[in-house]
Image (tube, rainbow, N blue to C red):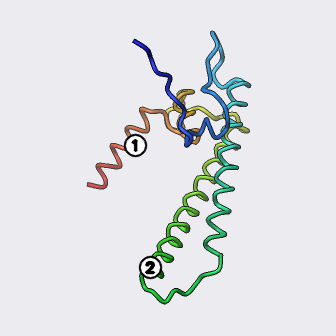
Amino acid sequence: MKIKKKKMSSLSILSIAKVKPYKNKKNEKYMNKNQIKHFTKILKAWKKQIENRNKYYKNNISGEQINFPDPIDRAVQEEEFSLNLQNSVRDIKTIKKINNTLKKIELKNFGYCCSCDIKIGIKRLEARPTANLCIDCKTLAEIREKQIIK
């Protein structure tokens, strides 16, 4: 039986930064120079991609508005404007998270849970480089959040 190789999604953060998943070396210290360099490259590439996309949204938001006589065309234009605005706001929040994470790298406390101070893990950080909670603390936080909402 032939095993198919899994292709990396074009939306993957790793593919944006053009890096492969980090491979741990034997007896390698957690958050060493190579790992920090790996994550810094990912974060900076992700930030650059978001900034470029955000320029597109801002151009569409601030671009010339055509006053369509047809109400359906006007509604479509308003919906596009609304979606671009929402996307722009989301991107700004993500850039703030990336900047905070880059500061954590500078302060040498990147990769550790803010709640319990254990290692977050390379795989989890590659999936979400801005993660600041380990999987256990994040699960507990989500459970608490669901209990509050209900």
- At x 52%, y 86%, the residue is 68
Image quadrant where one finds the N terminus: top left
Specify whether 48 is left or right of 120: right
Q: Which mark is residue 141?
A: 1
Q: Which mark is residue 75?
A: 2
Tell me where residue 16 sits by quadrant.
top right
Count how many numbered circles sit on residues in the image.
2
Residue 25: x and y in percent read 64, 13
Mark 1 vs mark 2: which is more N-terminal?
2
Residue 2, compared with residue 51, is above or below; it is above
Indicate left or right for 142 with 90 as reference: left
Front-lying residue, 70 or 14: 70
Identify which amino acid the numbered label 2 is placed on. Answer: Ala
How far across and down, in percent of the image, does residue 134 sit?
A: 48, 33
Q: Residue furthest left?
A: 150
Q: Assign the C terminus to one quadrant of the image.
A: bottom left
Q: Residue 70, relative to residue 127: is it above or below?
A: below
Q: Residues within 10 Å of mark 1 (few under 14, many from 20)?
A: few
Residue 53 image offset from top left, x and y in percent: 64, 57
Residue 145 located left or right of residue 125: left
What distance separates the C-alpha of mark 1 from that of mark 2? 39 Å
Q: Which quadrant of the view contains residue 65?
A: bottom right
Q: Nearer the viewer, residue 127 or 11?
A: 11
* Closer mark to the observer between disc 1 and disc 2: 2
Q: Secondary structure at mark 1?
A: helix
Name the amino acid, label 1. Ala
